[in-house]
Image (tube, grey):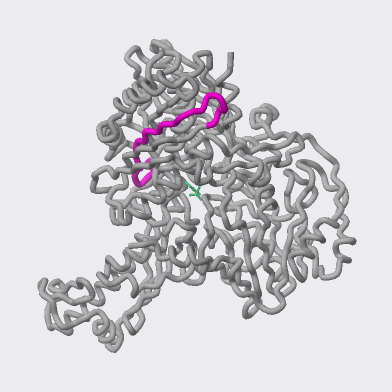
Amino acid sequence: MKNIDSKNHVTGRSVYVDDIPVQTGTLYGAIFGSPKAHGKIKSLDLSKAEALEGVERIFTYKDIPGKNQIGGIIEDEPLLAEDEVHFVGHPVAFIVAKNEKIAQKAAKLIKIDIEEFEIITDPRKAQKKGHLLIPPRTFHIGDVKNEWSKCESIFEGKVEIGGQEHLYIETQGSYSYPIDNGSIKIHSSTQGATLVQKIAAQVLGLPMHRIEVDVARLGGAFGGKEDQATAYACMAALASYILKKPVKHILHRLDDMHMTGKRHPYSADFKIGLSKDHKILAFQTTMYQNGGAANDLSPAIMERTLFHTTNVYFIPNTKVTVYSCKTNLPPNTAYRGFGAPQGMFLIESAIAKAAYELNVPKRTIQEKNFIKENDLFQYGQIAENVNITNCYQTAKKKYHIDKIEKDIQEFNSKNPNHKKGMAVMPICFGISFTKTPMNQARALVHIYQDGSLGISTGAVEMGQAVNTKMIQVAAKVFSINTDRIKIESTNTTRVANTSPTAASSGADLNGNALRIACNALLERLKETAAKMLSCKVSEVSIVDETVLKNGKKTEILWESLIETAFLDRVCLTENGHYATPIIHFDKTKEKGHPFAYHVYGAAIITVTLDCIRGTYEFDDVKIVHDFGNSMNSTIDNGQVEGAIVQGIGWMTMEELAFGKDGRLLSNSLSTYKVPDIYSIPKNIEITALKTEGPELALLRSKAIGEPPFMYGIGAYFALTKAIREFNSNYKLDFDSPLTPEKVLMRLYQK
Ligand code: LUZ
Ligand code: MOS
């Protein structure tokens, strides 16, 4: 099935928040953010701004009728700053005016006097001063301390890992207006409709049932709208509630870039010990997560880093510690991979270091240490249905890795100024929210009298085509045409208490809830059919919109079946609830079974480096990926391709820069480079590993959103390999992103 949105996207007909027709009297918002990164507000002068013609009102924390608090995990983040500011852009006031231009102009007329405090942007410095968002956490297995003496070789190193701007095409935004009885309706570009509802209710001092949140679709999110859409929705809701008028607020790109949090940069130290035959015996690391000025999702992201720092390897003695450090940057947040990419870049760096020092190919160490069936992850889950060796061996054979290596050698020996490099990047990603209670979902299905269906789930469409997959699920259960099914917007009055669409699990959780609802309806319809045919329910089935009796076609078609059921007063509406079975995690022991299953895969990535300029092109990314039994390979392959490009961007070109004053310097697309059509690998080949797929995946089709992002990590190691082919003096280091400038410096390092 094709993505149901393709045509409307391409022709510009799809509706986003900014496309909703506005009501008469709609007002427009703008934020006044702190010009300083850290300090005490001594005075705030709104008078000039308030006097501007067309300004309706300016809101500060004093206007909040409920609680000035938006922190999701830990309550440490005011919606509007009270007496202190903690990052440049920290929202202080929300201006509402007749139009956007006036609102923006008024923001420039606000005067603030701030007594400046010390600005810290470096996580190690923050940790030294004791500025932590939460206490550190450690995962361990085996006995690292006593294992070092048994190691043949031990290597240590330092790793710097860069952050990443989400750069969703649609910026943060919302449209909020009063509805009947003093309630508020919010259209928000959010991954988490319920989170917006809950926090808006808290800010306004209302019960949740007075807030309705509706989400049609997002123009991209990547995690940037899991938590951080909430603040903007709450500001518009506050203004519309108090003024009793519609308020619209869409962030300008530059405001969005400097006010919102990003992927967390990390700094880390590691120590890795190997046996003579390249088994990794021990691995220890301390990581410093740059959390920004408030917790946001940092504790959960720290947790996923702890889960994934051994990637796809079994290391019998492992100790991982993460410090979540408080700095004067916008609170960093969820971003595709959710802390796992940082952990996985770290272990790959440690392995690369060992390979470099031992003068063996990196993949020799990688292949030796792949996790096997019944091995233990450091968080206590037993590895089941492991197929990394399978993926890797399939890739090796299918793509002729020996030939790739030989061709590269030949190319490099013939070309003095161009060098090629190759890397293997295996992945293992756990599927489920690490916080067990979040792994639940609901769906609502209506069958209308004419046989058409309206379905609602808690899943948010953000370009990943989850809506298409939902329609496939319903069509499959009933065996009816997909064009009979309409998917409704995500709305808190139809589906309540939703988890954000995140953790790659939107389709699994919501699709299973939908499957359960549809199955219950199907049972009722079969009863109707059995009555019509005077037979047993067990003799009835529906195939291709036709009722069968004992496998033989009858005269009864879908539409007449529905009509009869309705006249017979059968309920044609059903609600489905799904909660992932089996999973659990005990934080006091840091052990459990947090994931429903894991996604595996292996990529071979090759690059050609221009050694005069330091520029490079990725030639090939060849992958064997474990999709399970993919329910839509066009969509799933699209997710893999997009993820790889985004991952390569993170590793090689997207460089965030902050000034000493805490101000974002890479604040536009001229200073923050993202992959464009020319930087996409020339060839991406994706092979699906042949498997049945796990029972806990939706129709045995594995989650796809995040896992392939980590293939991009291979880009870093392919590049360092190519650099060394040109400059044997280059001392391997780990400092991502490896931008062309950095590559050039390393090509001529003495
Ligand atoms: N969001 C979240 C996530 O709240 N918990 C998770 O475990 C997670 N994992 C990946 C991406 N988003
Ligand atoms: Mo996410 S990083 O919102 O799955």
| Above or below 566: residue 282 | above
In the rendered image, residue 606 lying in the magenta stretch gets the answer yes
The percent position of residue 54, horizontal first and vertical second, equals 82, 70
The percent position of residue 686, horizontal first and vertical second, equals 33, 43
733 to the left or right of 485: right
Q: Could you say which is closer to the camera, residue 155 or residue 624?
A: 624
Highlighted magenta segment, given as a residue range: 593-615
**How many badges with numbers are in the image?**
0
In the rendered image, residue 286 lying in the magenta stretch gets the answer no
Q: Quadrant of residue 97?
A: bottom right
Q: Could you say which is closer to the camera, residue 609 or residue 48?
A: 609
User: Which residue is at a point 53% across and 25% down the rendered structure image?
Assistant: 734
User: Which residue is at a point 29% across and 48% down the rendered structure image?
Assistant: 628
Q: Is residue 135 visible?
A: no
Q: Quadrant of residue 364?
A: top left
Q: Could you say which is closer to the camera, residue 311 or residue 257?
A: 257
The percent position of residue 243, horizontal first and vertical second, equals 74, 73
Q: Could you say which is closer to the camera, residue 567 or residue 68?
A: 567
Q: Quadrant of residue 140?
A: top left
339 to the left or right of 390: right
